[in-house]
């Protein structure tokens, strides 16, 4: 068993609620802190641990995987540019998983599950077995199939598909489509945090109406709509001040306010609130008010994202997972190697991957040193030397300025003592 696997197994056997630290694991299991860090990150992705503010990393009970948004077999036909040979009545069914028929038929029944997809070439016995077990079949290489197989597909109602692509290409295409669905599903959206059926004022309302609504709801900020429920303004207690009750809301409201749709990512809405220093955003559909998102609810949902294991990893996560992190004076240090994911077409580390690394190192510096969640304000970067594949690099992010609502950090990437890239990052603090 590898050191990595041994650490994961150790974490799984811990009592739920146990605290976990990199140093503790490294000492107890006699491994490096970098190895312990990577294992903890993988355990978090698998749902065995969770990192919480002011509590640290905790062993949690792994929840059963939630049902994901599957591809339908009809969508599979389209993405592999295939055709339907039989079992058309089952095209609407979801694809639960797929497997490649590269083993002996007598071994396949252990792996084929109902409503899964067997990707296989010109092998009638495998095709027949899959259909009998309630699975669909995708025949690769453009091969034809026996009439008996087509009849069985029609009888079982499971699709029998064909594609001219080879097995590896088909599997890659389907896997990419599933991955996109998973990542898209993991994104928390405004509709997951917004207040539905919100209180509001109309353009014909008065300051007196605002005061009555305030007494009833104890809220001080409201969207303003016209007779068609289209948002045309926002009014807050700062606009009211000591005005007379008869003053019309339309004369004092903030016109043409920033709005978001309910399908916008919560991170986007949070950043808008931080950048524009606003505490309420109307949520619209076809320009009509359907809800409101408060800064408090947006930040709560945004911070919740950092606790969730990703089913489909984002590009930032893929890059960061290749580096271990340690705390240094007034900052953090990331250590790791450049790998194929980070390369550009010329075979050296791409500027995009290095900038991703530097930006995230900056965010981690503020999170680790100041316990602050931040969003990017500005980013200035200079590149001095190229870095090749499988080269050891260090990324140091040092906080150089800290205000009440903003901060700056200097970030350097070094390879073999030589400066590779240097940047200054400015961030804005997300108020808790």
Image: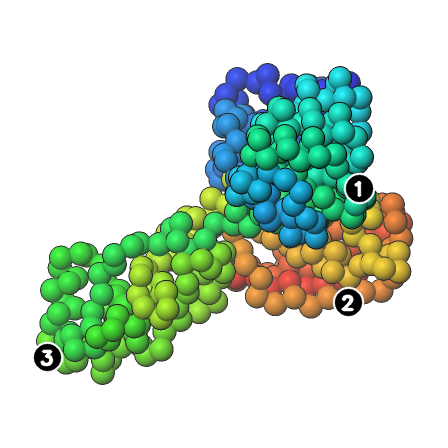
Earlier-in-chain disc, 3 versus 1 = 1
Dot 1 and dot 2 residues touching (CB under 8 Å): no
Q: Secondary structure at mark 1?
A: loop
From the viewer's perspective, is residue 314 above or below residue 243? above
**400, 96: nearer the viewer:** 96
Q: Residue at x 74, y 60 (%)?
A: 352
**In this rendering, the label closer to the viewer, 1 or 2:** 1
From the viewer's perspective, is residue 85 above or below residue 352? above
**In this rendering, the label closer to the viewer, 2 or 3:** 3
- Residue 384 in which image quadrant: bottom right
Q: Secondary structure at mark 2?
A: strand
Earlier-in-chain disc, 2 versus 3 = 3
Q: Give the Cα separation between the discs numbered 1 and 2.
A: 54 Å
Q: Secondary structure at mark 3?
A: loop
Earlier-in-chain disc, 1 versus 2 = 1
Q: Give the Cα separation between the discs numbered 3 and 1.
A: 80 Å
Q: Which mark is residue 217?
A: none
Q: Which residue is mark 1?
A: 143
Q: Which residue is mark 3?
A: 246
Q: Residue at x 59, y 38 (%)?
A: 87
Q: Residue at x 65, y 48 (%)?
A: 77
Q: Give the Cα separation between the discs numbered 2 and 3.
A: 58 Å
Q: Which residue is mark 2?
A: 382
């Amino acid at each position: 068993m590898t050191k990595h696997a041994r650490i994961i197994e150790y974490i799984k056997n811990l009592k739920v609620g146990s605290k976990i630290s990199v140093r503790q694991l490294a000492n107890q299991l006699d491994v490096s802190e970098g190895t312990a860090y990577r294992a903890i990150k993988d355990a978090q992705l698998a749902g065995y641990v969770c990192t919480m503010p002011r509590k640290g990393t905790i062993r949690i009970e792994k929840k059963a995987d939630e049902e994901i948004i599957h591809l339908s077999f009809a969508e599979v036909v389209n993405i592999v540019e295939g055709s339907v040979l039989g079992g058309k009545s089952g095209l609407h069914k979801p694809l639960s998983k797929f497997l490649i028929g590269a083993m002996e038929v007598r071994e396949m029944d252990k792996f084929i599950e109902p409503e899964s997809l067997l990707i296989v070439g010109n092998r009638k016995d495998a095709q027949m077995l899959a259909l009998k077990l309630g699975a669909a079949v995708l025949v690769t290489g453009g091969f034809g199939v026996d009439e008996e197989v087509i009849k069985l597909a029609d009888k079982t109602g499971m699709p029998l598909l064909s594609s001219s692509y080879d097995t590896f290409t088909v599997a890659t295409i389907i896997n990419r489509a599933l991955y996109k669905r998973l990542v898209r599903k993991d994104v928390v959206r405004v509709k997951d945090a917004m207040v539905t059926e919100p209180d509001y004022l109309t353009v014909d309302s008065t300051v007196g109406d605002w005061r009555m609504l305030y007494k009833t709801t104890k809220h001080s900020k409201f969207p303003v709509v016209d007779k068609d429920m289209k948002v045309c303004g926002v009014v807050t207690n700062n606009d009211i001040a000591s005005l007379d009750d008869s003053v019309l809301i339309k004369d004092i409201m903030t016109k043409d306010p920033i709005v978001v749709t309910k399908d916008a990512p919560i991170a986007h809405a949070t950043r808008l609130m931080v950048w524009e220093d606003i505490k309420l955003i109307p949520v619209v559909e076809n320009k009509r008010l359907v809800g409101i998102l408060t800064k408090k609810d947006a930040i709560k949902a945004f911070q919740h994202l950092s606790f969730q294991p990703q089913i489909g990893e984002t590009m930032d996560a893929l890059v960061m997972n290749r580096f271990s992190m340690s705390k240094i004076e007034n900052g953090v240090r990331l250590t790791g190697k450049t790998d194929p994911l980070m390369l550009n077409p010329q075979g050296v580390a791409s500027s995009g991957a290095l900038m991703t690394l530097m930006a995230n190192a900056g965010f981690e510096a503020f999170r680790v040193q100041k316990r602050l969640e931040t969003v990017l304000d500005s980013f200035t970067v200079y590149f001095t030397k190229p870095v090749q594949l499988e080269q050891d690099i260090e990324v140091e992010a040092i906080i150089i300025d800290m205000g009440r609502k903003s901060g700056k950090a200097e970030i350097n990437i070094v390879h073999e003592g030589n400066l590779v890239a240097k940047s200054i990052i400015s961030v804005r603090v997300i108020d808790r």
